[in-house]
Image: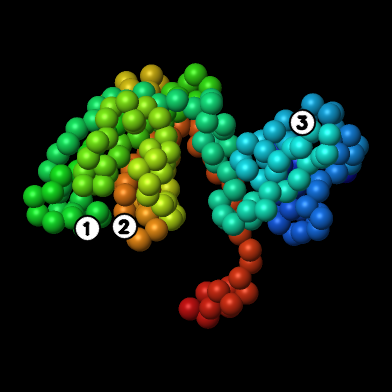
Amino acid sequence: MKEVSLLNKKEFIIQDLLSKIYQRHYPDGKLPTQRELARAYQVSRYTIQEAISKLRDIGIIKVVQGSGIFVRRNAKQNPLIYNSITATPYKRISSKPIYLKRIKATEADKRTFELENGEDIWEFQRIRIVNYQIVQIERSKLPYKLFPNLELKDIAHSIQAYVLKQKYTISHYITSYTPVLINKEQAELMGCKKGLPAMKIQNRCLLKDGICYEYSEVLALDYTCTYITPFNKEVHSQRRQN
């Protein structure tokens, strides 16, 4: 197989396997063995192991000892396959809370969370640490009435896990990305230089009933994401006509 210079070997293999998985190249749901993959891609077993580990970490495949490598049944439900956070196992991600405070909801907060006059929200800030490096600052808001018992210790861990523990059903996320530059205050929190390029990620997190349970703004360093989306002929034709 001819090597592609635009991607390193591991990343090329990951994207090539994703392409094959989404095109149903493995109809029985089972991938070749690591030895077979190493031979096909003309790389070492170690490189294949790294690629397989990443696909496993992002939930695309599962490795069954003694049986093989299998595509997970729900692997193709989300067009966002992985990013620099979701590709990292939870055990290598930690959060350090900066503050948690209960405040009066602004007009924007009331619209976001469908609140009445006089209602409160939680606001918190934390830094996210991946592999012992600070990579994100997160500022979030949650409606107080949904989470009256939220504590500082709770935001040191997964908010999604906390929400599920409160017996809510999470539906989906609406996410937007904007390139920005790190300002002085952010640089001090993250221990980096002012003016570095970063990604601002805005999230609206929704429950099954459509209620927004969290709005967050995340500032991320070293942020990459990979999507895989099917070609929609109808939409393509409509865009050409407009």
Residue flagged by tag 2: what amino acid is it?
A: Ile
Whether residue 150 appears in this view of the structure is: yes
Residue 129 percent location from the top left of the image: 45, 25
* Sequence-wise first label, 3 or 2: 3
Residue flagged by tag 3: what amino acid is it?
A: Gln
Q: How far apart are marks 2 and 1 (CA)?
A: 8 Å
Compared across the picture, whether 59 is left or right of 48 comes to left
Q: Which residue appears farthest toward the left when viewing the image?
A: 118
Residue at 30 percent across and 39 percent down: it is 140
Which quadrant of the structure image shows residue 40? top right
Give the number of the disc on residue 114: 1
The residue closer to the viewer here, 9 or 138, is 138
Q: How far apart are marks 3 and 1 (CA)?
A: 48 Å
Tag count in the figure? 3
Compared across the picture, whether 196 is left or right of 47 comes to left
- Where is 88 relative to 13, above or below? above
The residue closer to the viewer here, 170 or 227, is 170
Whether residue 195 appears in this view of the structure is: no
Element under disc 3: helix
Mark 2 = which residue? 211
Compared across the picture, whether 107 is left or right of 60 comes to left
Colour scheme in use: rainbow
Mark 3 = which residue? 49
Residue at 17 percent across and 36 percent down: it is 102
Q: Looking at the image, do the residues carrying marks 2 and 1 touch, with CB atoms under 8 Å apart?
A: yes
Q: Distance between the residues labelled 3 and 2?
A: 41 Å
